[in-house]
Image (tube, rainbow, N blue to C red):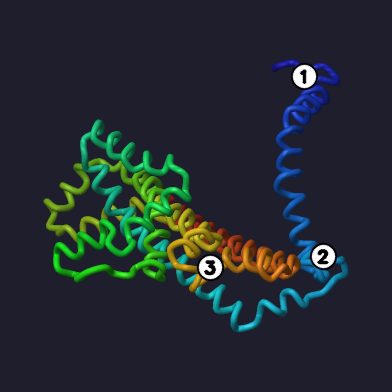
Amino acid sequence: MTAPPPAGVGARRGFLTAALLAPAGLTVAGLVLVPLLLVVRDSFATPDLYGGTKGGFTLANYRSLIDPVYLKVFGYSLGMAALNAAVCLLLGYVVAYYLVSRAPQRQMLLLLLIIVPFWTDFLVRTFAWINLLSPGGPVNSLTDAVGLTHGPAQWIPSQGASFVGLVYAFLPTAIFPVYASLRGVDPALGEAARDLGCGWWRVHTRVLLPIARPGLLAAALLTFIPTLGVFVIPVLLGGGKNQLVGNLIVTLYTEFRNQPMGAAASVVLLVLMLVSLAVFGTAARRLRRKTA
């Protein structure tokens, strides 16, 4: 039997652990919890004449968000986030499957080619899409060459250009989780399924997709939730015609100069994200129970 530790050793260890964790805890509290509490508090305040808050407690800010104009923005944001997640999952699975079917050295090169463009600033990449999709730009020249268009085509600003920008921005976050799930799959597994009579479709739906479900779930989470808060892409590529929740919050804070209502919209966005996390978490737990 080992001898019990001397008296006071446990207390000293607890104090040392608390001292080591204190800087991180204070940082999280100061940069995350305190601003979050301030936003929640402002969401129940009343606005003053200069765009600030003058205290008080009211639910009017949340009641104002029930207006059909704002509900349309929230509904459009959820639909666009779901569509973006679905397209990113489809493309991410195809790209991930292609990556894992290459030689290991080639996989590293292809992954590097996917990552390198995203080392550039986000705004620079968004403006690059403006140049690509502008009338007479490279994409327009290509469509003219194949006969799809004849002359300058006005694709920007548009809802389609905004969606292309969203897919481009979040596609890598869908590729990597799926790639991580498929990387450990033995290639002989697919060959065995084909030898047993499975065609291309059944190999993927019956064999590979079930294995890739954890990665697909993580990819859906990493694309759906951030899309709700995006505001740069709809403004630059969509012209601000179809706003996401992020655009609504910026508009309430800057143009309408209504901080309490902007804070209320921020809280609603946070609640939507938490609900999404809960849904994905429930799905992940059910998936673990099925595979256990």
Frontmost residue, 251 versus 36: 251
Residue 93 image-quadrant placement: bottom left
Residue 119 image-quadrant placement: top left
Q: Name the residue type under label 2.
A: Thr
As drawn, the residue found furthest toward the bottom would be 68
Q: Name the residue type under label 3.
A: Leu
Frontmost residue, 106 versus 144: 144
Q: Name the residue under label 3.
A: 244
Q: Residue at x 47, y 65 (%)?
A: 81
Q: Which of marks 2 and 3 is nearer the N terminus?
A: 2
State the separation of the CA atoms marked 1 and 2. 58 Å
Q: Which mark is nearer the camera, 3 or 1? A: 3
Q: Which residue is drawn at 66% across and 68% down?
A: 255
Circle 2 sits in a helix, a strand or a loop, which is it? loop
Q: Name the residue under label 1.
A: 4
Residue 214 showing in the rendered view: no
- Disc 2, disc 3: CB below 8 Å? no
As drawn, 226 above or below 2: below
Circle 3 sits in a helix, a strand or a loop, which is it? loop
Q: Mark 2 points at which residue?
A: 53
User: In the figure, is residue 86 to the left or right of 121?
Assistant: left
Residue 216 image-quadrant placement: bottom left
- Mark 3 crowd level (few <14, some 14–19, many ≥20, 10 Å Cα): many
State the separation of the CA atoms marked 2 and 3. 25 Å
**Image coordinates for residue 85, horizontal then vertical, percent:** 42, 61
**Image coordinates for residue 92, horizontal then vertical, percent:** 33, 53
As drawn, 41 above or below 177: below
Frontmost residue, 222 versus 209: 222
Q: Earlier in the sequence, mark 1 or mark 2?
A: 1
Q: Which mark is nearer the camera, 2 or 3? A: 2
Q: Residue at x 41, y 63 (%)?
A: 84
Q: Which residue is drawn at 54% across and 61% down?
A: 231
